[in-house]
Structures are given as C-alpha cells and as structure tokens.
Amino acid sequence: MTNRPQRVLALAQLTNSIGDGAYYVTSALYFTRVVGLAPARVGLGLTVGWAVGSLVGVPLGRLADRRGARGTAVLLALATGLAVASFLVVRGFVPFVLAACAYASAQSGLAAARQALLAGLVPAGERTGLLARLQSTLNAGLAVGAGIGGLALHAGTRAAYLAVFALDTVTFLLCAGLLLRLPSVVPGAPRKRDGGGKPGVLRDRPYVVVTLLNTVLLLRMPLLSLGLPLWIAERTAAPDWLVSALFVLNTGAVMAFQVRMARGVTGLASAAWAVRRSGWVMLAACAVFALTAGASPWVAAVLLVTGAALQVVAEMGQSAGSWQLSFDLAPADRIGEYQGFFGTGVTVARTLGPLVLTSLLVEWGTPGWLLLGGATLAASYAMGPATRRAAGRASEEITRPVLVG
C-alpha cells in the first residue's frame, strides 16, 4: 500500500483542527456574549453534551465496524459540521444544550470511526507512528486556528464570532470530502452477543481496566488550560504571561518530538514500558511545579518552564503507549467499538479533570501536586499487569495473533 491514505488522513486532520483551534479560543465568549448565556449555564450545557457524547461513542463505533468505517466517518464529519452550524442560530439554553449534545456525539463518533478507518487502511506496525504524526499535525492546525480565533477576539464583534463558527463548519465539510477520497474498508462480520444486553466491549473487563487506568493518566489534560494558570495566579509570584509561554512550549514540543517519541513503541511490552516511564516523568514534573510556591518570580518562572518540559515529555510518552495498547488489545473486527469506548477516557478527563485539578492544586497546594504525581505513577505501573491480562484475554478471543514486543 502506498502512503496516499496516510497523507489524506493527515490532511483531513489538519483541516478540521484549524477550525477546532478557532472554535476552542472563541466558544466561551461566543456563548456568553452572542448567544447570551450565563457562564454557569454554558458549563452545564457543555458538561451534559460531553456526557451524552461519551455514551454514544461506543454504538457509533460499532456502526463503523458493521456498516463501513469510511462512510460512517464521512457522515459523522458532516454531522459535526451541521452541529457547529446550529450554534449560529441557537439563542436559548435548551436549544444550546441540544446543539451541544449533537456536537459532542458527532465528535465522539467521528473519533471512533476515524480510528477504525485508520486501522483498516494502515498496517498494525505503522499505526502508532502515524498517530504520532497526526498528533503533530493536530497541534499545528490548532495553533493556526487559535491565531485565527485570536483575530476574532481582538475584533470582538458579533460578525467576527459568527465567522469563526462558520469557518469551523466549513472545515468539517472539507474533512468529510477528504475522507470520501480514501479507499473503503470492508466491514467486520457482526458478532452475536452472549447473554445480557451490554455491548461486547463492556464485557471485556481487562480492556475496561486498561481504559480506566488510561483515564486516570488523562486527568492531566486540563493542566495547561486550567490547572497551571490558576496555580500561577493564586500560588506563585511568576508573571501571568508565562501561561501563554507554557502553552507554546507544549504545542511546539509535541509538533517537533511526538513522532520521535513514538518510534520505540512497537508492541504491547514497549507500550506498557512507555506508559510506566511517563509516570515517573510526570511525578518529577509535579514535584518541580510544587517547588514554585513561595519562590521568587524568576526562580518560579524557571521551575515552571522546567516542569512544563517534563510534563510534555510525560504526555508524549503516555500518548504513544496508549495508542498502541488501544489498538493491539482490540479485536480486529471491532476496532471502532473498542476505540469508541477507549475514547470515553478523554471525555471523562475533560469533564472531571477541571474539578480534580482545582481541588488538588488550588485548594491543597503542594500536597495536591504530590498526590497528582503519585496517582499518575500508580496508574502507569498498574498498566503493565492490566495489559498482560488483557493480552491473555485477547489471545483467546481474537483470531489474529497479538504480539508482545
């Protein structure tokens, strides 16, 4: 197979990530200033939306397995674009919640369908490397989109906000067109369920445990957008502008080094080792962040940059390891269903992460940093035995062999 499908996947990723970057930096102010909602209602509506999205990710992933990953991904990309377009016309809380549910559901399903499409088009040994390149592409697109969103924020007009949401809509339509250019993937044969009505992935307890452990590791996701800004403002003497510098450092590092960090992850053993190593690095990052409390402004700034550098190293290692685990531990004909479930970890982290981080860091201070680092290390070490158990279960149920690297 040529690299054309990989290039198309990367271009599709770049296209809609530009729209997402613009959406992320403007959405909060759009919903409050243009739609006219109170901030608390915006938060509640988005929480409800992502909660619904996490529930429908699995059935939409199963749909991709049974009806074809490409067609499902195209339809869900179109649905995401339409959901974003609906934000242009909503002017009340109930319509906003409905639009948020549609948006989060389509996004969750699209993520699962794209993973199933990738699995069908790319050999197993190349998937983690491609996901690393896609992650770098994602960060590049988000950076470009954030710049566009920044222009809209600077203008501050209703028309500027509407233009950003229209741009995001168009990028998802373009993404759908690009995905349509990919070869079709033959759907997997439907499997009968044994007793009970639960989806098959929920009966795969070892895979559920791996997903739960990965969710714990993902609780650091709101760190740059929420945890560190509040920590810097409330607990350190460092300048506030350092928040943007740390964001740039993280984004640039992922763009430059994520592919290199993923090269050594080629199987289950190397993936579990990468996750375990990332736990130690994250613990070190948390310890460095904890030292910034009470330090002089420039000492705190140096420590914050050091901690952010360690944090992004941990993030890249954990990402590469989890990608490999999520694919290799899933049945070959149920990738979409399993990826839909594995992806709920991101949704849960986005929902619970802000509450966990503000409680640990802002309220508890230094002990909170150490507890966060300790929990991350414990989850990363537990991933090893959980992976071995899941691999043993998979070898009994999956017709393809699972290689432990």
Image (cartoon, rainbow, N blue to C red):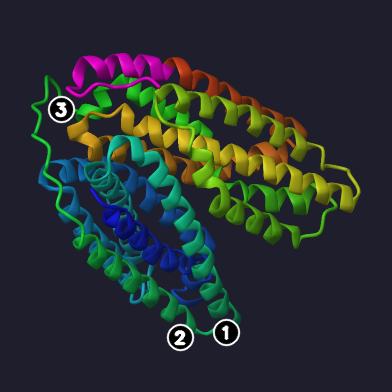
Which residue of the protein is positioned furthest toward the right in this rendering? 296
Q: In the rendered structure, which amino acid carries the disc numbered 1?
A: Ala
Residue indicated by mark 1: 155
Q: How many angstroms separate mark 1 from mark 2 (CA)?
A: 9 Å
Seen in the picture, residue 87 relative to 317 is either above or below; the reply is below
Q: In the rendered structure, which amino acid carries the disc numbered 3?
A: Gly
Q: Is residue 391 magenta?
A: yes
Q: So how many labels did they put on this image?
A: 3
Magenta highlight: main SS: helix
Circles 1 and 3: CB atoms closer than 8 Å: no
- Circle 3 residues within 10 Å: few <14, some 14–19, many ≥20: few
Q: Is residue 3 magenta?
A: no
Residue indicated by mark 3: 197
Residue 225 visible in image: no
- Helix, strand, or loop for circle 3? loop
Residue indicated by mark 2: 159
